[in-house]
Image (cartoon, rainbow, N blue to C red):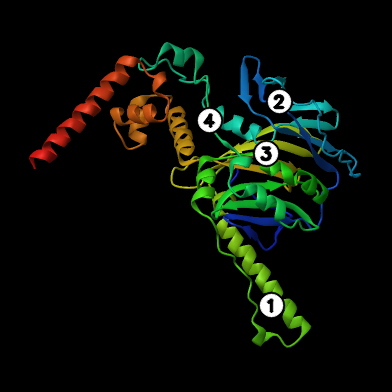
Amino acid sequence: MSTGIALTGLTVAPAQTWGGVRLVPLLRADPISDLRLHARLYEDWLSVVRTAPRRAYLSFVPHAFVATWTTDATPAAAYGTQLLDTGTPTAMTLAFRRRMARREDRQRLRFLPLHMAMEGYLALQFGGPTIAWQEWTRQAVTRGLSPRVEASYSGAAIAGLDDALRVFEIHPDQCGMMLYVADALAAAFVVPHPDDYRALHPTLLQDFYGELIFHYAYLYAAVPEFAARLDDSRVDSVADLRAQLARARADWAAFHDLMAGGLLATGPLTVTPVQRMGRYTLSRFVPAFDPHAENHVGETITDDAGRLAYLKTFRLSAAQAKRGHLLSQLAAHDWDLDATAAALGTDRDGLVQRLDRSGFGHLLRPDILDACRNRARNLRARRTGEAERG
């Protein structure tokens, strides 16, 4: 368990805005040189990724990240982006990839950015009911939640994001950014070295984003700029000017911590280690699924002292967070409908309706689901008749 994401070793620079997009650069005064990332771009329309012996993940995978590290503190080499020139496809191409994270050498690891984090969300209680309660179908008990499906939007579909990434200035020490759309935190991205960021900056357009971000980009055409103001009445020397600049930077950092509080000051995170890489660990995390707060899934690479080397996040929509919350509550109460309903402050029919609206109705026996739907229709009809008589 973790209590949030700590941007250890990173400082915040003033934001840049373009329409409804705000980018907050993250600078690293002491870059990490013994771990480097580069992109490997794919041109397949669809990828099937094996996540377990009898489990697969089906998605569009535009690129992978390849991490290279050393074990003796010497600088690691970044190989640069590899473009695969396969020509213009004449039909839909399908690729089979063996794992989300796979070693290619003793000190080289290929992993699929964001897909690892999304798999952690899709795998929530994937096995289904732990006890064969009579309310669940045989398929729910034997096959669980297979298949699980979630939708997202490519960065190319987010209005204004392509122009924003093209015109934003990249700082010399920039190793990451916080991306806001209509001042809603869309994603966080951190890499070990400024050279890595410059090479990987364009991949932000190939990442996927949630439904909220897609709609906000169209609904909000512009966001205000927050310009730092210096008190010239207190500036009588170079030292005074430096003090004013330091205060402005501190104010901006505090304001950014407030804007990014949904990620940085979130509740407990469930962190799952995926791969050990020398003194670094690749992990993914899921939130506590609070329906009334921001919920971000993501992946990190941290060193043995806890310093953040890599971060990539995806903001879940309200509906996705509610599905995660519902599954977590079911698992916490051994998939007992009555106990789960009591914990959620509703009755059995209310819980069945929630499951149905969340896309999990197929897990329940048809007679139970139909009876609940009939009772709900009768109740609505009775209330409508009472309102008309009144």
The quadrant holding residue 15 is: bottom right
Quarter holding the N terminus is top right
Distance between the Cα atoms at labels 2 and 1? Answer: 52 Å
Secondary element under disc 4, as helix, strand or loop, is loop
The residue beneath circle 4 is 150
Question: Is 340 or 155 nearer to us in this picture?
Answer: 155
Check residue 124 in the rendering and tell me which mark sits there, or answer none: none
Q: Residue at x 55, y 40 (%)?
A: 210
Distance between the Cα atoms at labels 3 and 2? Answer: 13 Å
The residue beneath circle 1 is 244
Give coordinates of residue 288: x percent, y percent.
Answer: 51, 40
Q: Residue at x 78, y 26 (%)?
A: 87
Is label 2 or label 1 in front?
2
Q: Does any portion of residue 213 appear in the rendered image? A: yes
Is label 3 or label 1 in front?
3
Give coordinates of residue 102: x percent, y percent.
Answer: 76, 26
Question: Is 14 or 44 nearer to us in this picture?
Answer: 44
The residue beneath circle 2 is 44
Q: Residue 124 vs residue 206: left or right?
A: left
Labelled pair 1, 4 in contact (Cβ < 8 Å): no
> In the image, is residue 265 above or below residue 110?
below
Q: Earlier in the sequence, mark 2 or mark 1?
A: 2
The residue beneath circle 3 is 206
Distance between the Cα atoms at labels 4 and 3? Answer: 17 Å
Secondary element under disc 1, as helix, strand or loop, is helix
Q: Earlier in the sequence, mark 3 or mark 2?
A: 2
Residue type marked 4: Glu
The quadrant holding residue 269 is: top right
Question: Is 20 or 253 nearer to us in this picture?
Answer: 20
Q: Residue at x 90, y 45 (%)?
A: 75
